[in-house]
Image (cartoon, helix red, strand yellow):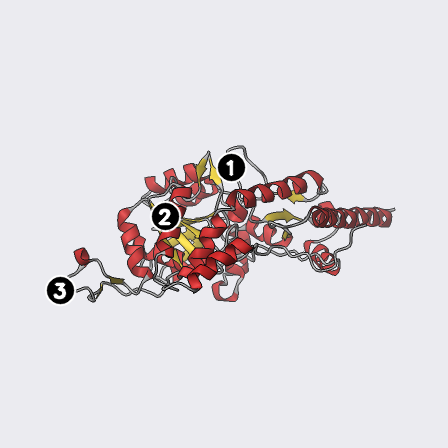
Amino acid sequence: MFIPKKEINYSKQNINTSDLKEIKKVLFSDYLTQGPKVQQFEKKINIYCKSKYSVACNSATSALHIACKAIGLKKNDLVWTNPISFVASANCALYCGAKVDYIDIDLERFNITFENFKKKIDKAKKTKLPKLLIIVDYGGFPCDLDKIYKLAKKNKINVIQDSSHAFGAKYKKTKVGSCAYSDITVFSFHPVKIITTGEGGIATTNNLDFFKKMQLYRTHGITKDPKLFKKKIKKSWYFEQKLLGFNYRMNDIEASLGISQLKRIKLNLSSKKKIAKNYFKLLDKKVLTIKTEKHVESSFHLFPILVDKNKTNISRDELMDYLRKKKINCQLHYIPIFEHPFHKISSKKKYDLYPNTMKFYKNAMSLPMYFGLKQDEQKYVIKTINRKITNGYRNNNSKKR
């Protein structure tokens, strides 16, 4: 039987010699930052996603922040988002002084649904509707984008698509990032994502006004475009600060890595699809896997499962602890945002308003999923899980006798 020599991670980066060559070129060039590579990367992202504009940043969190600023989010505005996400999906709104509320998820697709969004809309019409909806493509799976976007626009709600997990995904044969169902889409290029720039993110949009504002917010609010100058000074050295911006720039080293990684996107996606197919086929059916839909092509950033002790006779925590002892490093994605002390809400409210989210939190875990996961490693993961569940089920039945 195969036994791993070292720990099998839930995810990790994939860097090859081609990446190193591109990085080396930049390191020995005239520009480490504010050179030509960032614009080249942005153009390649536009071509790939079929978007008009993009703004590369030093993280997806930064991209989410400037997206909120470009839309005009301000103090006391209301934002709705998915509670099962990284905290940045809420923090980007809080940075602007806005207030954040959540939409409960579905326990089949592990995401918000059109039905849950509509229920919240109908109820909120009596009080206050949000200015902004931040939808999250959890695990690389786009949610009910078309219906949600249509209803949001009907109620004059802006939509940011947090696609940090979903670079390369498609919805109804349309690339995520094309902004067909959002005003702005944001991707992450963190090391464990589909492609990486080391750290980094990007915002895509088809709205010229949003694009120009995001460019300003990314770079201290500074412009070198004479058309935007207030003062009529025509000097090559002159620039103006137009608003209070941030230092959220991506550098040329990171952009060069992104350009190189983008060449392997098809290979990365096909590899993850194959890994996911094995999990769907071979995992014990007592484990609940995410529901797939014909019109959704996931990027499979994650492979999340639910371990319900009533069905498996072993809890999520017990299984995770056991797997760690067997050198299998799984992870939880995510602790609900409102469960963090900074975002804390009352116990009654969270169980009344977000029952599915709380059940997900109790039972969810993510299995190893990354380009480079070997076949014998994945088989070992699956066999170890299945054996533990089978043994737990047998032990429980013997106790009943």
> Where is residue 78 shown, x and y percent of the image?
36, 54
Q: Which-is-in-front pick, marks 2 and 1?
A: 2
Of the residues shown, which amino acid type is indicated by label 3? Ile
Instruction: Name the residue tied to disc 3.
Output: 233
From the viewer's side, name the closer residue of 220 and 244: 220
Q: Quadrant of residue 109?
A: top right
Dot placed on the residue nearer the N-terminal end, 2 or 3 = 2
Q: Which-is-in-front pick, marks 3 and 1?
A: 3
Report, in whole angstroms, how far the alpha carbon at label 2 lies from the one at label 1: 25 Å
Q: Residues within 10 Å of mark 1 (few under 14, many from 20)?
A: some
Q: Are marks 2 and 1 in contact (CB under 8 Å)?
A: no
Report, in whole angstroms, how far the alpha carbon at label 2 lies from the one at label 3: 30 Å
Q: Is residue 57 visible?
A: yes
- Residue at the far right: name it: 401
Of the residues shown, which amino acid type is indicated by label 1? Val
Q: Is residue 128 visible?
A: no
Residue at 43 percent across and 45 percent down: it is 120
Instruction: Name the residue tied to disc 1.
Output: 296
Of the residues shown, which amino acid type is indicated by label 2? Lys
> Where is residue 187 shown, x and y percent of the image?
44, 51
From the viewer's side, name the closer residue of 24 and 230: 24
| Element type where label 2 sits in the image | helix
Vertical relation: 62 (above or below) 106: below
Instruction: Name the residue tied to disc 2.
Output: 43
| Element type where label 1 sits in the image | strand
Dot placed on the residue nearer the N-terminal end, 2 or 1 = 2
